[in-house]
Amino acid sequence: MSEPIVVARDLERRYEIRQGLLRPPAELRALSGVSFALSPGRTLAVVGESGCGKSTLARLVTMIEPPSAGELRIRGQAATPDRWRALRDSVQIVFQDPYGSLNPRQRVGTILQEPLKINRPRMSAAEREAMAREKLALVGLRPEHYDRFPHMFSGGQRQRISIARALMLDPAVLVLDEPISALDVSIQSQILNLLIDLQERLGLAYLFISHDLSVVRHFADDVMVMYLGRAVETGPAREVFAAPRHPYTKALISATPRAQPNSGRKRIKLTGELPSPLDVIPGCPFAPRCWRADDECRATRPPLKGEGRAFACHHPEEGAVE
């Protein structure tokens, strides 16, 4: 296997939250101890409920924010703020909303050339235009689209433009932040097929952030399940979906819509309250909602254990999802 392009070790991200004039600020741990490696041609999916830290992780990997602790390495180099400018060519992002991520006052050609103007100042105007037209064709758009404005396109076409813009600097990694959730169902498969084709042709690595496990099951090579800023289960997607070991993973998979609703699979309905990220409880953070929790779970936080296939649970699930 090729050497990883991105390696993260024990990434943390903390924020200070003001609580009032006379009260000290509280600390919100948006990300705690997250580690992973991402290799060329592979897709790592990050899944979990809203507020689990998926988007925070995306901001760290794309060097929009620095980690509060831990280490992020890109192409073997430490991604410290003083090296961000040199490393940003290697990692680009495709945002969730294709309607809000494109400047409505600029033509498509100008939008595509902008990364080159900033990062390749020595390129001539003719070279920038040639590259922009090349990327436009790469994502399946026609030459006449080059001079149009974003409002003249459908949602799927706008997302193709966003993908083309992300490819302008020839990155090795694309961070895909819910790239199809704002699109019609009929268009989602087209964008996924485009991403698969680009990965095969260019050898791209994808960090795919999604809440749609039915898409993740077929699109990702590996999965990282997050809960309250921590990874609770990681491993090959096929193994995780076939036999989840963490109860939270099993609950997420059981809630995934199926083509045959009367197939007999039992949906697990979580009860209890989600702990506050401002006041993380001792022990396993999933314990208040877990049907397998006991005194050990409430007293001691389980570490993420395992090589390749890892999970953080004192009493892991056994067997396949029913």
Image: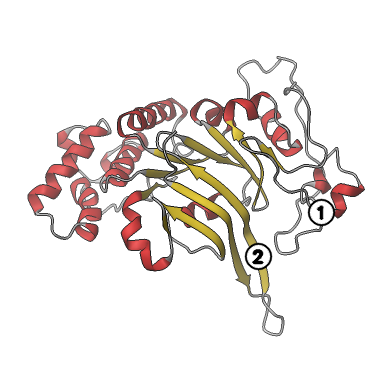
Q: Nearer the viewer, mark 1 or mark 2?
A: 1
**Numbered badge on residue 217:** none
Q: Give the SS element for disc 1.
A: loop
Q: Which residue is at 28% across, 33% downward?
A: 139
Q: Which residue is at 56% across, 53% downward?
A: 9
Q: Nearer the viewer, residue 104 or 290?
A: 290
Quarter of the rendering containing residue 132: top left
Q: Which residue is at 62% across, 48% downward?
A: 50
Q: Residue type at mark 1: give it.
A: Gly
Tell me where residue 42 appears, x and y as whole percent. Answer: 45, 34
Q: Residue type at mark 2: give it.
A: Leu
Tell me where residue 73 appears, x and y as whole percent. Answer: 45, 54
The residue that mark 2 highlights is 28
Q: Which residue is at 55% across, 34% downward?
A: 222
The residue that mark 1 highlights is 283
**Residue 280 showing in the rendered view:** yes
- Horizontal side of residue 160 vs 267, given as left or right: left
Q: Nearer the viewer, residue 122 or 80?
A: 80
Q: Is residue 319 above or below residue 17?
A: above
Q: Quadrant of the N terminus?
A: top left
Tell me where residue 91 appears, x and y as whole percent. Answer: 37, 50
Q: CA distance from mark 1 to mark 2?
A: 17 Å
